Image (tube, rainbow, N blue to C red):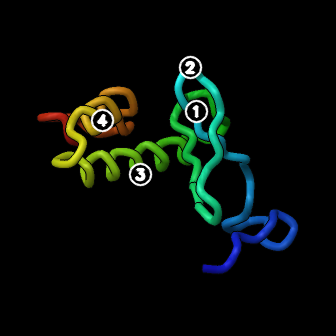
């Protein structure tokens, strides 16, 4: 897989934007796997772009649906914490 481009090389598309760090026991940082890729979604309501934030919430709810049978508690927690604007949540699903 090719390396994700920098912001300078792809300013309005997919580009490097965050440094990611895992948190281990007692809050101590642990290294991430070499070559791993992560995509960060803003899920709180503090951003300037409500359309972008709602799109992020749609994405995290799609993830919750995909993991529902494997990690039901996490799926439930994600749906409850990050509801999608303009949808009624019935039975825990948007």
78, 52: nearer the viewer: 78
Closer to us: mark 3 or mark 4? Answer: 4
Reading the image, the residue beneath label 2 is: 26
Secondary structure of residue under mark 3: helix
Closer to us: mark 1 or mark 2? Answer: 2
Closer to us: mark 3 or mark 1? Answer: 1
Q: Residue at x 63, y 27 (%)?
A: 28
Reading the image, the residue beneath label 4 is: 74
The quadrant in which residue 10 appears is: bottom right
First in sequence: mark 3 vs mark 2: 2
Q: Residue at x 57, y 55 (%)?
A: 39
Q: CA distance from mark 3 to mark 1?
A: 23 Å
The residue at the far left in this view is: 91
Secondary structure of residue under mark 1: strand
The quadrant in which residue 23 appears is: top right
Pointers 3 and 1 in contact (CB under 8 A)? no
Pointers 2 and 4 in contact (CB under 8 A)? no
- In the figure, 49 relative to 35: above or below? above
First in sequence: mark 3 vs mark 4: 3
Closer to us: mark 2 or mark 4? Answer: 2
Q: CA distance from mark 3 to mark 4?
A: 15 Å
Reading the image, the residue beneath label 3 is: 59
Secondary structure of residue under mark 4: helix
Q: CA distance from mark 4 to mark 1?
A: 17 Å
Pointers 3 and 2 in contact (CB under 8 A)? no
Reading the image, the residue beneath label 1 is: 23
49, 67: nearer the viewer: 67
Label 3 Cα neighbours within 10 Å, binned few <14 / some 14-19 / many ≥20: some
First in sequence: mark 3 vs mark 1: 1
Pointers 1 and 2 in contact (CB under 8 A)? no
Q: CA distance from mark 2 to mark 4?
A: 21 Å
First in sequence: mark 4 vs mark 1: 1
């Amino acid at each position: 897989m090719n390396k994700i481009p920098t912001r300078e090389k792809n300013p309005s598309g997919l580009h490097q934007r965050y440094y990611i760090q895992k948190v281990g026991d007692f809050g101590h940082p642990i290294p991430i796997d070499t070559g791993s890729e992560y995509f960060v979604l803003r899920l709180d309501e503090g951003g300037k772009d409500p359309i972008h934030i709602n799109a992020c919430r749609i994405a995290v709810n799609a993830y919750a649906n995909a993991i529902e049978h494997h990690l039901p508690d996490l799926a439930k927690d994600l749906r409850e914490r990050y509801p999608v604007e303009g949808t009624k949540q019935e039975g825990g699903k948007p």
